[in-house]
C-alpha cells in the first residue's frame, strides 16, 4: 500500500505518489493530462467526473434549451468554495460529493499506476480553511476509502514540491505566492538543519482566486454584449459563457488581444463581436490581484522585520500565470527575485506526496523566544538575539 498526494482544487485537481525508487511522480489522468477538472455531473443519471463532466458543460449549447437547463442544474462546479457542513447540491451533501470525487481520483490513480494501491492520503487545503472544513475534508477522504488521512496547507506543499522537483535545495528562505482557481495563499518557508520549517503564520483569502477574475470578466463581457443581444446573460449566469470567459482569460496570458463573440441563445441571429485587449482584462481584475499583493507584502514585511533570510518569491497556481502578477509584485516588492516553475499547476500535489516521506515542520502556535537582555521577541529559529547579538540567552514563550 502507498500514499497518494492530492491537491483538491477549486477548478482542477492533481495527484502524485512516490514510486518504488523514492521518486515523486505526477499522476497522468485521461489523455495523459496532469490535471483533472473538479467537476461532477449527474446529467443522465449516472455520475460523470472530470473531463467527461467538463466536456458536457463545454458543449452545453448543442443541447435543446430544456436540456441545457437540466445539465447545468445537475452539474457541480467549484464545490471547494461552497463548502457548508449542512449544504446539499444535486440532492447530495457536500461531504458525499467530495468523497465521490476523491474516490474517482483514487481509482484513476490506481488504474494509471497499476499495480499500486493507495490506502494513505496527504490532502492539501487553503491556509484560511476553518477547522470544520478540514474535518469535512478528512471525513470525505475516509469515506472514499483512505485509511490514513493527513492534511497539509497548500503553499507549504507547493514549496516542498518545487524544492524537491526543480533543484531548489540550496534555498534558505522563500515566499510562496499561491494563486489558484478559488483561493489565494502566501507562506514563508525556511530551510533549517535539513528540514523545511514554516516559522511565520501563512496568510490567505479563501474567496480570492481565478473564479473571481472569471466572474469579473463575465460581467464585463455581458455588459458589452447586452445592448446587442439583450439581457439574457444578465438575468442568470450562464455556465457555458462563464467557462468561455475563463478560456479567454487564459489565452490573454500569452496574447495582447483576442477576438471574441457572444451569440444569443434566444435568437442565434444576434451575435456580439469584440476584440478584447489584455489591458482591459488587467483593469477588470486589478482589485482581485491587489488583494493578493497586499497579503504578500504583509508576510514579506514580517520576514524583513524578523531579519529572516529570503531568496525569492515563487509563483504557484494557474492564476499566477497572468503577466500582471509578476509586474505588480515587482512594483510592490522591488529588488526581490520572482521565480516561476514549469510545474506551477501540480507543485502542490507533488509536495503532498513528498511530505509523506519528508514531513514539513509547521509551527502553527508561532512560538517565539525572548532575549533576557533587551526583551526583544525573536523567532526561535535563531540561537542568538538579532538585536543585541548575545547568544543563547532566551526565555521561551508564545505571543
Image (cartoon, rainbow, N blue to C red):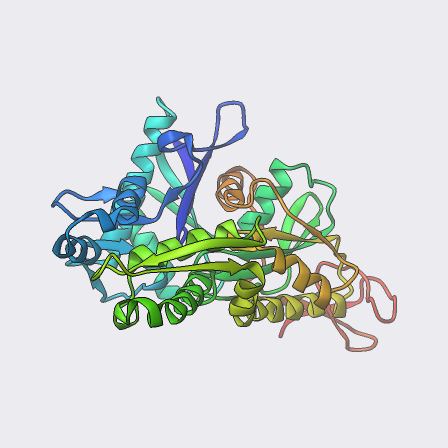
Where's residue 187, x and y in %?
A: 60, 59
52 and 221: which is toward the camera: 221
Q: Give residue 182's quadrant in the image.
A: bottom left
Where's residue 357, x and y in %?
A: 53, 37
In the image, 167: left or right of 152?
right
In the image, 136: left or right of 397?
left
Total numbered labels placed on residues in the image? 0
Quarter of the picture containing the C terminus is bottom right
The residue sitting at 33% across, 39% down in the picture is: 105
Quarter of the picture containing the N terminus is top left
Where's residue 154, x and y in %?
A: 50, 53
60 and 367: which is toward the camera: 60
The residue sitting at 34% across, 29% down in the picture is: 110
The residue lying furthest to the bottom in this view is 375
Where's residue 368, x and y in %?
A: 67, 68
10 and 3: which is toward the camera: 10
The residue sitting at 44% across, 68% down in the picture is: 216
User: Can I make out residue 381 in this image?
Assistant: yes
Amino acid at each position: 500500500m502507498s500514499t497518494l498526494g492530492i491537491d483538491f482544487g477549486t477548478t482542477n485537481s492533481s495527484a502524485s505518489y512516490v514510486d518504488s525508487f523514492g521518486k515523486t511522480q505526477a499522476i497522468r489522468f485521461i489523455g495523459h493530462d496532469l490535471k483533472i477538472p473538479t467537476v461532477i455531473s449527474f446529467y443522465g443519471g449516472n455520475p460523470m467526473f472530470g473531463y467527461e463532466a467538463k466536456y458536457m458543460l463545454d458543449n452545453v449549447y448543442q443541447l435543446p434549451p430544456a436540456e441545457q437547463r437540466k445539465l447545468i442544474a445537475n452539474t457541480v462546479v467549484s464545490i471547494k468554495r461552497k463548502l457548508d457542513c449542512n449544504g446539499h447540491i444535486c440532492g447530495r451533501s457536500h461531504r458525499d460529493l467530495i468523497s465521490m470525487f476523491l474516490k474517482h481520483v483514487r481509482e484513476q490513480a490506481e488504474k494509471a499506476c497499476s499495480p499500486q494501491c493507495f490506502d494513505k492520503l496527504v490532502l492539501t487545503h487553503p491556509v484560511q480553511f476553518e477547522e470544520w472544513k478540514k474535518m469535512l475534508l478528512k471525513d470525505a477522504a475516509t469515506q472514499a476509502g483512505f485509511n490514513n488521512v493527513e492534511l497539509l496547507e497548500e503553499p507549504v506543499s507547493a514549496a516542498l514540491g518545487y524544492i524537491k522537483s526543480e533543484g531548489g535545495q540550496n534555498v534558505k528562505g522563500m515566499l510562496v505566492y499561491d494563486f489558484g482557481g478559488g483561493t489565494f495563499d502566501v507562506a514563508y518557508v525556511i530551510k533549517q538543519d535539513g528540514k523545511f520549517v514554516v516559522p511565520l503564520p501563512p496568510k490567505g483569502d479563501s474567496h480570492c482566486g481565478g473564479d473571481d477574475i472569471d466572474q469579473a470578466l463575465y460581467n464585463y463581457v455581458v455588459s458589452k454584449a447586452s445592448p446587442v443581444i439583450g439581457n439574457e446573460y444578465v438575468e442568470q449566469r450562464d455556465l457555458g459563457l462563464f467557462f468561455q470567459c475563463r478560456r479567454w482569460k487564459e489565452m490573454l496570458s500569452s496574447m495582447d488581444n483576442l477576438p471574441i463573440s457572444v451569440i444569443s441563445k434566444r435568437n442565434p441571429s444576434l451575435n456580439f463581436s469584440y476584440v478584447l485587449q489584455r489591458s482591459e482584462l488587467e483593469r477588470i481584475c486589478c482589485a482581485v490581484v491587489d488583494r493578493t499583493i497586499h497579503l504578500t507584502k504583509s508576510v514579506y514585511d514580517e520576514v524583513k522585520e524578523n531579519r529572516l533570510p529570503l531568496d525569492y518569491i515563487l509563483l504557484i497556481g494557474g492564476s499566477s500565470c497572468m503577466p500582471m502578477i509578476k509586474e505588480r509584485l515587482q512594483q510592490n516588492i522591488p529588488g526581490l527575485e520572482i521565480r516561476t516553475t514549469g510545474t506551477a499547476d501540480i507543485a502542490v500535489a507533488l509536495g503532498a506526496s513528498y511530505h509523506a516521506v519528508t514531513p514539513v515542520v509547521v509551527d502553527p502556535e508561532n512560538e517565539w523566544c525572548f532575549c533576557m537582555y533587551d526583551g526583544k521577541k525573536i523567532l526561535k529559529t535563531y540561537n542568538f538575539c538579532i538585536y543585541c547579538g548575545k547568544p543563547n540567552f532566551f526565555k521561551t514563550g508564545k505571543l
